[in-house]
Amino acid sequence: MRRVYQCLPVYEFSTGSYSIVPIRDEDKYPIMQWRNEQIDVLRQRHFLTRENQETYFKNVVDKLFEKKQPDQLLFSFLENDILIGYGGLVHINWENKSAEISFLTETGRSLDKHQFVNDWNSYLKILKKVAELQLNLKKIYTYSYDIRPLLYQALNDSGFIEESRLKDKVYINNKQYTVRIHSLVFEDISFRMADVQDVDLYFKWANDVEVRRNSFHQGTIRYEDHSKWFFFKLKSEKCFFYLFMDEQKNAIGQVRIESNQHETTIGVSVDSGFRGRSLSGKMLKKATDNYLRKRPDGNIVAYIRYENISSLRSFVSAGFIQQEVLVHEGVKSYKFLKG
């Protein structure tokens, strides 16, 4: 039976051939073996027994699924649906919105340098999306002993910054090691509804080269046509312009949700100065969650050009589910749905 955490909307999160699912009871003995084999890199003083592991899963793990805000979320880490590791978010502080990252892979994989970095990078890619987009955390961090330098390569690749070092903090095999703490702080974004003063900003975004390339109608838009369209949509009760800003109140992009007699559709664009920071998925989630809270029986349809892979990933991270591949307005497209 699949178990689902109450604070997460879905069972599985993935990237490529890698995925995480809520920790499975069937994985407890492989996990026990790996922990015992790699005890030197863990905050674990004694070797685990089968009895220890049974008790831990019964008294700790099973109870995590009963809570709306558990103090940890543990996952089985899979490649092509085969268990290769486990980990999660631990020491979760729901008030401060922070959590520590826990992760361990099968011992043989952890000894292969290339495999070790690749596994960590893939795991962090998935976990970052869960922490930011699904749990709305502001900070995630690692607490590690300075004996695995390749770990820091993976953390750097994933945007983590070294926050502090605790020199000679731990003893391992009668030798002192430094503890290194790396953290990732997610950008805090907010939105307001657009108004008439935003007409020029939306015109700039609408005629951005990349926006036009990924649109279904790719021609340049005239200012006169844009102004008429923009002011008309602002007055409509069926069109919602979500304008997003960063912490300094810089405009970073927009999401538009609009209903017609057949369906409610959505579009998104990010200002060229803010691209490459994984903001579109977060914008989409915030806008759609706001919209659907007011209309709990509704749903939102997204049409994405078939070749626009980056946009596809953003919609998936925001909770959209693929429905089909079709021809939309003469273009081969994906159809996604959230509701």
Image (spheres, helix red, strand yellow):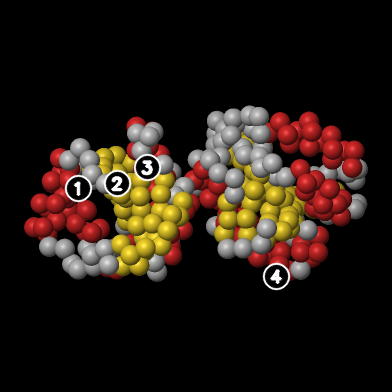
| In this view, 204 is above or below 50 | below
**Which of the 4 quarters of the picture holds residue 277?**
bottom left
Dot 4 or dot 2: first in sequence order is 4
Q: Do the residues labelled 2 and 3 touch (CB within 8 Å)?
A: no
Tell me the element at label 3. Answer: loop
Number of the front mark, 4 or 2:
2
Tell me the element at label 4. Answer: helix
Q: Is residue 325 left or right of residue 6?
A: left
Residue assigned mark 3: 299
Towards the viewer: 156 or 287: 287
Residue assigned mark 1: 198
| In this view, 330 is above or below 192 | below
**Which of the 4 quarters of the picture holds residue 63?**
top right
Dot 3 or dot 4: first in sequence order is 4
Spot occupied by residue 323 in the image (x, y as percentages of width and height): 43, 54
Spot occupied by residue 167 in the image (x, y as percentages of width and height): 74, 50
Q: Are marks 4 and 2 in contact (CB under 8 Å)?
A: no
Amino acid, disc 4: His
Amino acid, disc 1: Asp
Residue assigned mark 2: 263
Residue assigned mark 4: 114
